[in-house]
Amino acid sequence: MRLAVRLTPRGGRDAAQGWGQDHEGRVFLKVRIAAPPVDGAANAALIAFLAKALSRPRSDIRLAAGQTGRLKLVEIADLLEDDITRAFGSPP
């Protein structure tokens, strides 16, 4: 499954902040990470956060797009929509 995430690095703590939509109606998960956006630290922290929240090994999660941008596309192996809903609530 692919999951769109809007990442806020240096967010003070690691936490999901709910769901959002862009101007075209595409849904994304809003996530804050304490790590700075330096040398891939924020991306690594995002993967670790998602792995913990979804009870998945980090090896099941990879960044498919958006390595340097705020909006990222994350691929998560063998994930169901119910797993996302349990971890982060229902998307709009």
Image (cartoon, rainbow, N blue to C red):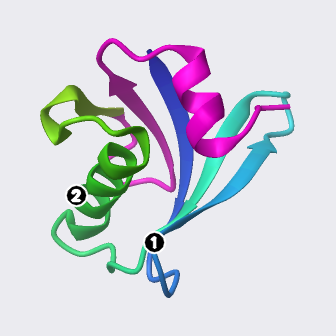
Query: Horizontal placement of 67 versus 30: left or right?
Result: left
| Contact check, label 2 and label 1, Cβ < 8 Å | no
What's the magenta region? 65-92
- Residue appearing at x 75%, y 45% in the figure: 19
Q: Position of residue 58 (x, y in %)?
A: 18, 41
Residue situated furthest bottom in the rendering: 12
Is residue 7 shown above or below 62?
below
Query: Horizontal placement of 57 versus 77: left or right?
Result: left
- Residue appearing at x 22%, y 69% in the figure: 41
- Residue appearing at x 72%, y 40% in the figure: 89
Is residue 86 shown above or below 36?
above
Q: Amino acid at mark 1?
A: Asp
Q: Which residue is mark 1?
A: 14
- Numbered disc 1: secondary structure: loop
Q: Quadrant of residue 76?
A: top left
Quadrant location of the N terminus?
top left
Query: Horizontal placement of 66 versus 20: left or right?
Result: left
Q: Of tags 2 and 1, which is closer to the observer? A: 1
User: Nearest the camera: 46 or 52?
Assistant: 52
Q: Residues within 10 Å of mark 1 (few under 14, many from 20)?
A: some
Q: Which residue is mark 2?
A: 44
Asked if the magenta segment contains residue 70, the reply would be: yes
Q: Position of residue 18 (x, y in %)?
A: 72, 52
